[in-house]
Image: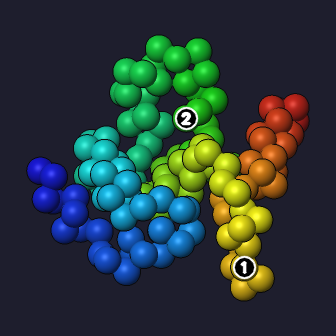
Amino acid sequence: MGSRASTLLREEEIEEIKKETGFSHSQITRLYSRFTSLDKGENGTLSREDFQRIPELAINPLGDRIINAFFPEGEDQVNFRGFMRTLAHFRPIEDNEKNKNATTSEPLNSRTNKLLCECGYINKMVTN
């Protein structure tokens, strides 16, 4: 079962996700394994229902908000790439000053991106 997850994720995809999210190779493969175990439809995406089957989210008072963070406006499925992008926002903030490079975009877990993500969520709550 664990080998199934590692064989479906290509090495170049892992490298792209590493650059985009800051997760390590082993974290990505472990999360891919978890993603595929949650994908009950085996279609390469997760639905809200897939997330709601996670016991820790089902009993969490903020579970619905956490689940909603994975789904852009109007979307009802998330693929592995989108799953990883969302998880990257939850990573601890790194010292980005040391790692700044003019040719790369700001990490998803930067203070600025976390603030933008939170502001977008608050705006969605106020307008709905």
Q: Where's residue 117, x and y in %?
A: 75, 48
Q: Which corner quadrant holds the C terminus?
A: top right
The label on residue 101 is 1
> Is 54 situated left or right of 41 in this image?
right
Q: Where's residue 82, x and y in %?
A: 52, 58
Q: Which residue is mark 2?
A: 67
Instruction: Give the residue type at disc 1.
Output: Asn
Q: Examine the rendering and report whether any part of residue 39 can be seen.
A: no
Q: Where's residue 28, x and y in %?
A: 38, 58
Q: Where's residue 91, x and y in %?
A: 58, 47
Instruction: Give the residue type at disc 2.
Output: Ile
SS at badge 1: loop
Q: Nearer the viewer, residue 14 or 58?
A: 14
User: Which residue is outermost to the bottom?
Assistant: 103
Considering only order in the chain, which callout, 2 or 1, is on the residue closer to the N terminus?
2
SS at badge 2: helix
